[in-house]
């Protein structure tokens, strides 16, 4: 019997990471599903039981070096191999720079960019041994800058630049690097950040624009309009299992259209014309 490929996923307590853990286990991976707070593991345990699969749930905070080294050591000692990694852990953030401290911006980069970089650095020796795959969940916000997402999009742009630059270097060692770009996915992402952002803009010159943006965004992320986490996970597993994985993949037609607009927009006018409507008062 062949040994199942071992896959490490970060940020699996909810959303895309949660769904990807189940989908990957169904696809035959031995999934090490990590989350910052293992106390939130109950839902994933139950979903795995319903699906008839096993997931190995472990603690991992990608902003803590000791947590990363401990998790990677556990995988080496327990499984002796690591065949794929899905960098999924991240945090949303809505705001604009005039209303924020630089500490807020740095915090966004710590989890969304430096956490990805730190984990990537730690797992590359194991991925070189297995000639494995490194897949990172970016966002269409890593391609298109979006209003009131300055810090978040900047971090995701940085992720895309980092991975695009790493890809040919890693390929010399047999490691395939891909980024996956979802558009709106019906998760806890927007409800968790919208109220704080609206309060932070209250009484400022940005209040009306923030209100317009959040109204538009709530509609986009409504389950009636947004992609489901399960559907996004299917697209991710397709990248993990593809004979020739792409360097960049989108998880939906909406994501492909949105990213495609930017990639064909040499002077930036198409993008800014669209995103300006997001902050226009009625």
Image (tube, grey):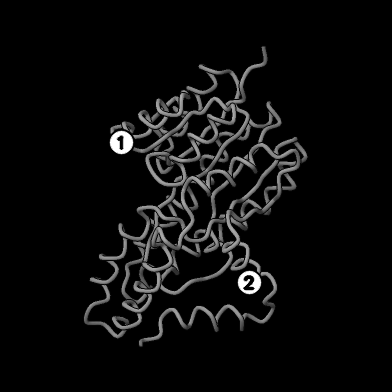
Return the x and y of residue 247 as percentages of the image width and height: 69, 51
Above or below, 190 relative to 201: above
Taking the spot 43% from the left edge, 52% from the top edge, the residue there is 110
> Which label sits on residue 262?
2
For the residues labelled 2 and 1, the Cα–Cα distance comes to 37 Å
Which of the 4 image quadrants contains residue 266?
bottom right
Identified at 55% across, 62% down, the residue is: 140
Along the line of sight, which residue is nearer the eye, 191 or 127?
191
Label 2 crowding class (10 Å Cα cut-off): few <14, some 14-19, many 20+? some
- Mark closest to the chain's N terminus, 2 or 1: 1
* Quadrant in which the N terminus is drawn: top right
Question: Residue 90, position in %: x, y?
Answer: 43, 50
From the image, tell me which residue sits under label 1: 40
Residue visible at 43% across and 41% down?
11
Residue 240 pos. (x, y %): 63, 39
Q: Is 130 displayed left or right of 237 in the figure? A: right
**Which quadrant is home to the C terminus?**
bottom left
Residue at the limit of the structure toward the right, as seen here: 172
Q: Residue furthest bottom?
A: 282
Disc on res. 266 = none
Q: Give the secondary structure at mark 2.
A: helix
- Nearest the viewer among 28 and 211 is 28
From the viewer's side, name the closer residue of 117 and 227: 227
Above or below, 7 relative to 103: above
């Amino acid at each position: 019997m062949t040994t199942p490929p071992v896959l490490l996923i970060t940020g699996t307590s909810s959303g895309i990471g949660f769904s990807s853990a189940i989908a990957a286990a169904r696809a035959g991976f031995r999934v090490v599903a990590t989350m910052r707070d293992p106390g939130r593991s109950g839902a994933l345990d139950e979903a795995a039981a319903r699906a008839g699969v096993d997931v190995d749930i472990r603690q991992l905070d990608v902003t803590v070096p000791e947590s990363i080294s401990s998790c990677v050591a556990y995988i080496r000692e327990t499984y002796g191999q690591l065949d794929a990694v899905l960098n999924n852990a991240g945090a949303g953030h809505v705001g604009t720079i005039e209303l924020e401290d630089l500490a807020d911006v740095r915090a966004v980069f710590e989890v969304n960019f430096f956490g990805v970089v730190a984990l990537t650095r730690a797992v590359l020796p194991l991925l070189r041994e297995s000639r494995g795959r490194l897949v990172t969940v970016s966002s269409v916000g890593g391609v298109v800058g979006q209003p009131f997402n300055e810090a978040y999009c900047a971090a995701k742009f940085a992720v895309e630049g980092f991975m695009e630059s790493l890809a040919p270097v890693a390929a010399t060692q047999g490691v395939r690097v891909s980024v996956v770009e979802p558009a709106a996915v019906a998760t806890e992402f927007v409800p968790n950040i919208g109220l704080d952002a609206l309060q932070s803009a209250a009484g400022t010159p940005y209040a009306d624009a923030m209100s317009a943006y959040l109204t538009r965004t709530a509609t986009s992320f409504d389950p009636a309009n947004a992609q489901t986490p399960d559907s996004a996970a299917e697209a991710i597993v397709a990248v993990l299992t593809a004979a020739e994985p792409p360097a960049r993949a989108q998880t939906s037609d909406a994501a492909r259209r949105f990213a495609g607009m930017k990639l064909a927009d040499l002077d930036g006018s198409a993008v800014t014309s669209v995103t300006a409507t997001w902050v226009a008062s009625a």
